[in-house]
């Protein structure tokens, strides 16, 4: 069991050791986005050149904000609501906003984990179910939808999601998804049962296992053909992209969301630390490891994707070779992959019309490499296809999906902690209800809310939540966090806090970032983000088998009621900031009209200043 | 006698040659990709292999059309290329100048496809009958989908874990409570002893420590 503090505070739990704390923070920061968002951004934004805006954003926005959250949580020793209430009661809305965002993000994030579990359960089959098309009803051919697209597309969209062609058609609850979602929430619950005692044990596995798997994949991928093509493609810098402002915006948002700032989870985790912990070093460690993991993951992923592109290219060539061999009646295996080009030139010269009549597909490795994907498309379609081509595909599939699950689970810990700690700190539940029951009720409520994502149109809703809840509200909260700590609490007080905790005041770099650079950059990113989003009517990609260009996804605009929900989702978390501010202001003004007490965190209602009239009245 | 048989054989083969032409309406084109299938262990294609093919096709015809005895001579082959590919037609054993129709040949090949493939160590893809698609293997669907089994195992373990942890914590709380009441009991025991000294509240800072701390 953890050590408890002395009777000064009511037994705040503590980390068993520093390693657990660091691993939990790293696990929270390192999530699915490091594996499936960063490599994609690297690829479309000119490879190595993307690292420049990324690292600049890390140093000037990411690390200062991370340091700030860890420091304030450790100093004030409360969850997100308690911390902001301590700094100033008018800022209490920040904590509520963090809590709401954590809850909303937690419910759709766990749905993604439910999908990962589904694929994990199916990785025990031989052959893998997404490697071949099922037969149609009268067993004369393959299923039409599967034939037109690919087996892995079919398995993802039809078998797993059973997706409707439109977000308006909700369909029904998919029972298999419901039970996968239930298992995902049960696994989260069992890790959370004992609070940070159980999380601290769980992160030994969930935070370190992904690195092991990434290494195994890297070693395996480097022995497969085509890995080097993938890596050169990923890292070849295209310096022109630096002129595009969208790149800078994406780099800043990627760093910001990747570090999981403004969820309140980091504040909660650091509040369980001892008082004299060096949080500056912790912040640097977590931030640097997060970015290093993104880079490392992209190397592994792209080695595998290079292999996949080469396999696709070779298949294309083999089809052409077969056509040529059959038509010209050459001996089998006369034309091989190596001498295909020679033969093609020769045949084109000698009998061009015959070659033209065969309508050979033009095979270009670059086109295969360009088939980029991010998010669920990368994990469940592209990577699943790649795994099928590797010898021993069950093992690789298992490893991959367990890695995704542990990456997501450790991030879920931070999300749920951002919900549970404020509930605990606000004393919302009476003391006689044990913590285990509160956690169970929270998980149950979250599970029931997340059932929307198990509808047939659930995938579209996850996209809605992912794009709109996990973006603008977080930027707003982070901006107000900076203002709250640096300007309301005061740079001087905060420097003294840090001196108390680490033994020295923060140096000029941190001060400059906190006071000027980071707020400006955050504001710039926020405005730019809102402007780019507002310029076009939001659209989504629908999987519609009736579409003419099927298997390409159809681009559809969101209907108005969904648009209203989007606005609601963006506004709901942050509405508490002005609401609480105004409410406390009114209360303060009412008090001020009766007494002269100042609204400061040190005001103690027991010692009201008597006015002369009150003194006369008593006498 | 011998000359008659010889003459008939020549006649039948001559007739057969006229019946078999590339693109014949009752004929099929066959393509073998031995190198692709077997790589290093590929055998060379020679007249013996061709004989085996004709024999296995005669076997397939015998299996399909009961009663008629097809011989190797009933399978006529032509237009052999280095690919290895050729055309074949099947003549009826009752009348050597008549061809067995396409549908029957297709059925026969379909039925015995596996046997023909195995004779040549090839598969449906590498021993291709152009125009006869391979029958797709029915998917193996076990009664309990395997993923449900894995799900059951995982959920069982998680559920057992939750129950175990909850029970443990309840037991520990009970133990703490009983220990607390034990401490209270022992405290209550000590107090009466001290009260013997006189009425009033027991103040441990003024105990008679002299025997212990004698100068």
Image (spheres, grey):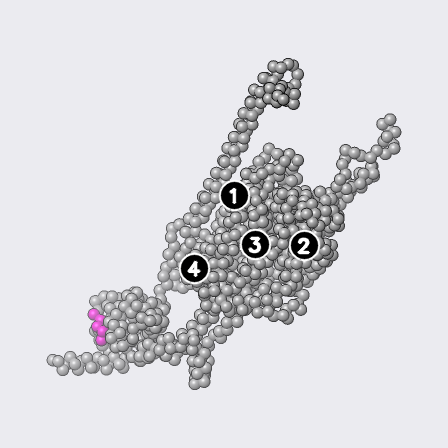
What residue did someone put label 1 on?
A190
- Which mark is nearer the camera, 3 or 2? 2
CA gap between label 4 and label 1 equals 30 Å
Residue appearing at x 54%, y 61% in the figure: A298
Q: CA distance from mark 3 to mark 2?
A: 20 Å
Vertical placement of A397 versus A309: above or below?
Answer: above
Residue at image position (56%, 27%) is B180
Give residue B158's mark. Answer: none
Q: Residues within 10 Å of mark 2 (few under 14, many from 20)?
A: many
Q: CA distance from mark 2 to mark 1?
A: 34 Å
Distance in Å between CA atoms under marks 3 and 4: 24 Å
Residue A393, labelled with which disc? Answer: 4
Badge 2 is on which residue? A64
- Percent position of residue B120, x then y: 29, 69
Closer-to-camera residue (A452/A129): A129
Query: Which quadrant would residue A340 be assigned to in this image?
Result: bottom left
């Amino acid at each position: 069991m953890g050590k408890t503090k002395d009777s000064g505070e009511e037994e705040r739990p503590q980390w068993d050791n520093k390693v657990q704390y660091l691993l939990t923070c790293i696990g929270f920061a390192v999530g699915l986005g490091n594996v499936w968002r960063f490599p994609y951004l690297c690829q479309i934004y000119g490879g190595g050149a993307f690292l420049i805006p990324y690292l600049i954003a890390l140093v000037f926005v990411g690390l200062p904000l991370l340091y700030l959250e860890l420091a304030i949580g450790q100093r004030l020793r409360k969850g997100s609501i308690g911390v902001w209430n301590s700094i100033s009661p008018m800022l209490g809305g920040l904590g509520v906003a963090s809590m709401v965002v954590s809850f909303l993000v937690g419910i759709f994030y766990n749905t993604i984990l439910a999908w990962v579990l589904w694929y994990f359960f199916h990785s025990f089959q031989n052959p893998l179910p997404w490697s071949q098309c099922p037969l149609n009803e009268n067993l004369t051919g393959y299923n039409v939808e599967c034939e037109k697209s690919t087996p892995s597309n079919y398995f993802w969209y039809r078998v797993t999601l059973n997706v409707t062609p439109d977000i308006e058609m909700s369909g029904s609850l998919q029972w298999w998804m419901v039970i996968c979602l239930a298992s995902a929430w049960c696994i989260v619950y069992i890790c959370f049962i004992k609070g940070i005692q159980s999380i601290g044990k769980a992160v030994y596995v969930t935070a370190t296992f992904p690195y092991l798997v990434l290494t195994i994949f890297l070693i395996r991928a480097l022995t497969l053909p085509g890995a080097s093509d993938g890596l050169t493609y990923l890292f070849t810098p295209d310096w022109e992209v630096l002129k595009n402002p969208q790149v800078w915006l994406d780099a800043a948002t990627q760093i910001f969301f990747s570090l999981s700032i403004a969820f309140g989870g980091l504040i909660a985790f650091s509040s369980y630390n001892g008082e004299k912990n060096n949080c500056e070093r912790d912040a640097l460690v977590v931030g640097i490891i997060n970015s290093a993991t993104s880079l490392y993951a992209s190397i592994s992923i792209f080695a595998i994707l290079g292999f996949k592109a080469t396999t696709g290219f070779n298949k294309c060539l083999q089809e052409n070779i077969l056509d040529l061999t059959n038509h010209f009646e050459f001996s089998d295996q006369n034309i091989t992959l190596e001498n295909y080009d020679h033969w093609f030139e020769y045949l084109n010269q000698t009998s061009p019309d015959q070659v033209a009549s065969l309508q050979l597909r033009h095979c270009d490795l670059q086109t295969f490499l360009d088939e980029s994907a991010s998010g669920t498309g990368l994990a469940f379609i592209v990577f699943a296809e790649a795994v099928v081509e590797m010898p021993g595909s069950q093992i690789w599939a298992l490893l991959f999906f367990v890695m995704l699950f542990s990456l997501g689970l450790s991030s879920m810990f931070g999300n749920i902690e951002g919900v549970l700690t404020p509930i605990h700190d606000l004393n919302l539940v009476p003391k006689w209800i044990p913590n285990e029951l509160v956690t169970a009720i929270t998980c149950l409520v979250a599970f029931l809310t997340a059932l929307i994502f198990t509808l047939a149109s659930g995938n579209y809703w996850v996209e809605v939540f992912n794009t709109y809840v996990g973006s603008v509200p977080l930027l707003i909260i982070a901006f107000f966090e900076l203002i709250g700590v640096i300007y309301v609490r005061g740079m001087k007080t905060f420097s003294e806090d840090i001196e108390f905790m680490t033994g020295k005041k923060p140096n000029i770099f941190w001060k400059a970032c906190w006071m000027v650079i980071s707020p400006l950059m955050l504001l710039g990113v926020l405005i730019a983000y809102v402007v780019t989003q507002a310029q076009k009517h939001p659209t989504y990609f629908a999987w519609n088998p009736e579409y003419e260009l099927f298997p390409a996804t159809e681009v559809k605009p969101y209907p108005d009621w969904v648009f209203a929900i989007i606005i609601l989702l963006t506004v709901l978390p942050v509405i508490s900031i002005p609401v609480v501010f105004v409410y406390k202001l009114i209360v303060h003004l009412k008090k001020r009209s009766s007494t002269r007490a100042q609204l400061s965190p040190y005001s103690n209602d027991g010692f009201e200043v008597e006015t002369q009239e009150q003194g006369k009245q008593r006498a | 006698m011998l000359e008659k048989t010889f003459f008939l054989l020549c006649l039948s083969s001559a007739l057969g040659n006229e019946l078999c032409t590339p693109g014949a309406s009752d004929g099929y084109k066959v393509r073998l990709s031995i190198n692709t299938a077997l790589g290093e262990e590929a055998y060379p294609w020679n007249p013996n292999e061709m004989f085996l093919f004709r024999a296995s096709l005669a076997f397939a015809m015998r299996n399909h059309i009961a009663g008629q005895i097809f011989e190797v001579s009933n399978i006529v082959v032509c237009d052999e290329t280095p690919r290895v590919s050729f055309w074949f037609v099947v003549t009826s054993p009752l009348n050597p100048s008549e061809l067995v129709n396409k549908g029957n040949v297709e059925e026969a090949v379909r039925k015995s496809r596996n046997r023909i493939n195995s004779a040549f160590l090839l598969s449906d893809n590498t021993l291709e009958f152009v125009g006869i698609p391979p029958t797709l293997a029915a998917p193996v669907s076990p009664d309990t989908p395997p993923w449900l089994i894995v799900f059951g195992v995982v959920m069982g373990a998680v559920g057992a874990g939750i129950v175990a942890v909850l029970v443990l914590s309840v037991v520990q709380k009970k133990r703490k409570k009983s220990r607390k009441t034990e401490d209270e009991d022992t405290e209550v025991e000590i107090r009466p002893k001290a009260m013997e000294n006189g009425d009033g509240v027991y103040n441990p800072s003024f105990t008679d420590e002299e025997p212990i701390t004698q100068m």
